Amino acid sequence: MTTPNLPDPYGSNGGANLADILERVLDKGVVIAGDIKINLLDIELLTIKLRLIVASVDKAKEMGIDWWEDDPSLSSGARRRELAEENQRLQRRIADLEAAAPALEEREENQA
């Protein structure tokens, strides 16, 4: 019986190569969390909360993390939605101004 010739996931020297490690990290995800507090005489001066998640986009979406899809600086779809909303606001404002224009013109004519 012959064994299939599959790539060795841990490299020839027994250690995993960088590509394999990166693939596993992106596939499974890594979470690093920590808090740093600096106190002086029981008075809290500074608190730093660190939350770092390293994962592929697919894995992040699977975990329910998709904040970049709503950030206009990172997503073209979010930017288009933001522009469409701004366009609708401006169109409503123009319609309101056009509706008020005849009354303003009539008032100016009465004052003249």
Image: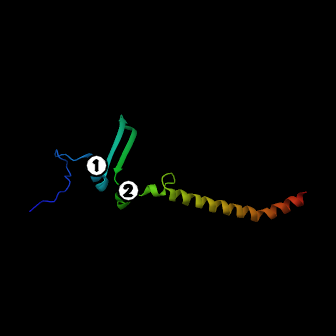
Residue type of the residue flagged with mark 1: Ala
Question: Tag 2: Cα neighbours inside 10 Å, few (<14), some, or many (≥20)?
Answer: some
Q: Quadrant of residue 36?
A: top left
Residue type of the residue flagged with mark 2: Val
Which labelled disc corresponds to residue 100? none
Mark 1, mark 2: which one is toward the viewer? 1
User: Which residue occupies the foreground of this view, 43 or 33?
Assistant: 33
Find residue 42 and report its horizontal and vertical position in percent. Answer: 35, 37
Which comes sooner in the sequence, label 1 or label 2?
1
Find residue 106 and report its horizontal and vertical position in percent. Answer: 85, 63
Find residue 28 and report its horizontal and vertical position in percent. Answer: 29, 55
Q: Which residue is mark 1?
A: 19
Q: Secondary structure at mark 1?
A: helix
Q: Quadrant of residue 68?
A: bottom left
Q: Name the residue at 67% across, 62% down.
A: 91
Q: Quadrant of residue 41?
A: top left
Q: Which residue is mark 2?
A: 57
Find residue 58 and report its horizontal and vertical position in percent. Answer: 36, 59
